[in-house]
Image (spheres, rainbow, N blue to C red):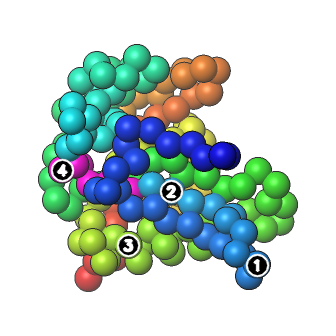
Amino acid sequence: MGMEYDQYDTPMSRWLAVHDDAGRVLAGARLTPTTAQCGVYTYMIRDAQNGLLQSIPQDLLFEPAPIGPHIWEVTRGFIAHDIPSSLRHKVRMRLVRQLLRTSREEGIGKMLALLPSNWHRWAARCALDMAPAGRQMDMGGVIYQAVWIDFAPALH
């Protein structure tokens, strides 16, 4: 049916979507509180660190995965592949504004994400305060890195 979902798509998560005027989804992301628990699963980065996910190295973080009401994980972030390069930054900025709005609504001070290692190239352009949370890792030929996204200054 054209749907993709996994064990982290639970009622505790929130999904953000950027649409065009016709309602077509241009970008999106899934947000999950680090306090989430559904059966044996919590959130993807923590479960990887605890050895529940074989596709992600356990040593992906510099420190133990956090659990706290003001820390959420952001996963499944995407921008539609057919968005022209001339519009990608505008779409990315709309998604960042949605992240910021949601961080205010939910009281999220920090988000933890697993991103391609080129995150630093667009973080500054999007005015996101991001920092490494773990080492760079080759996962299926793509270099990824866990990163912190700090929304605390924007909450005030």
Instruction: Describe residue 94's horizontal placement relative to residue 34 as left or right.
Output: right
Residue annotated with mark 3: 102
Dot 2 and dot 1 residues touching (CB under 8 Å) = no
The residue that disc 1 covers is 22
In the image, residue 47 sits, relative to residue 127, either above or below, namely: above
Image location (x, y in percent) of residue 19: 66, 73
Q: Quadrant of residue 58?
A: top left
First along the sequence among labels 4 and 3: 4
Kindly state the secondary structure of the residue where label 3 is placed: helix
Of badges 1 and 3, nearer the viewer stands 1
- Identify residue type, mark 1: Ala
- Is residue 4 depicted above or below 150 in this figure? above
Percent position (x, y) of residue 113? 41, 46
> Of the numbered discs in the image, which one, if any, rests on residue 29?
2
Residue 139, horizontal then vertical, whole percent: 54, 22
* Label 1 – label 3 distance at C-alpha: 23 Å
Marks 4 and 2 in Cβ contact (< 8 Å): no
Amino acid identity at mark 2: Ala
Q: CA distance from mark 4 to mark 2?
A: 18 Å
Q: Is residue 86 left or right of residue 26?
A: right
User: Mark 4: which amino acid?
Assistant: Thr
Q: Earlier in the sequence, mark 4 or mark 2?
A: 2
- As drawn, the label of residue 35 is 4
Q: Secondary structure at mark 4?
A: loop
Q: Residues within 10 Å of mark 3 (few under 14, many from 20)?
A: some
Magenta segment range? 31-36
The residue located at (49%, 23%) in the rendering is: 137
Toward the viewer: 46 or 153?
46
